[in-house]
Amino acid sequence: MACLAGERACPPEDVGDIPGYFEFCKALKDPNHVEHESYMEWSGGDFDGEQFDSESVNWELMQYLRWSRDRYQNWGGVE
């Protein structure tokens, strides 16, 4: 399993629901927004909602597959 293409970045964890994500993106783009500084700090200062990184996605998929495989093996398999 591998991700070959995609669009846009995944929202950061704990950003909230869809309106919360849109507000987050709006605040990052507007230096005068009341939450701009706190969101920049919280997100590490380099979040780009338009960016897509297939290598990061594939890394997460690999970690999940390893985790699920290890869980399956620890169960002794299904008979």
Image (tube, rainbow, N blue to C red):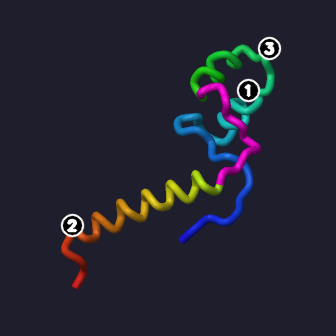
Q: Going by the image, does 13 lie left or right of 77?
A: right
Where 36 falls versus 61 (above or below)? above
Q: Position of residue 56 (x, y in %)?
A: 58, 51
Q: Position of residue 16 (x, y in %)?
A: 58, 36
Name which of mark 3 and mark 2 comes first in the sequence. 3
Residue with the most extreme front position: 55
> Which quadrant of the figure has residue 26?
top right
Q: Position of residue 28 (x, y in %)?
A: 73, 26
Given contact means CB atoms under 8 Å apart, are the residues at marks 1 and 2 in contact? no
Q: Which residues are magenta?
A: 44-53
- Residue 32 in the magenta stretch? The answer is no
Where 4 falls versus 24 (above or below)? below
Q: Determine the residue positioned at 28% across, 70% down.
A: 72
Q: Determine the residue positioned at 70% across, 62% down.
A: 5
Q: Which residue is mark 2?
A: 74
Q: Which residue is mark 3?
A: 32
Q: Which residue is mark 1?
A: 28
Q: Determine the residue positioned at 43% across, 59% down.
A: 64
> Helix, strand or loop at disc 3?
loop
Q: Main secondary structure of the magenta part?
A: loop
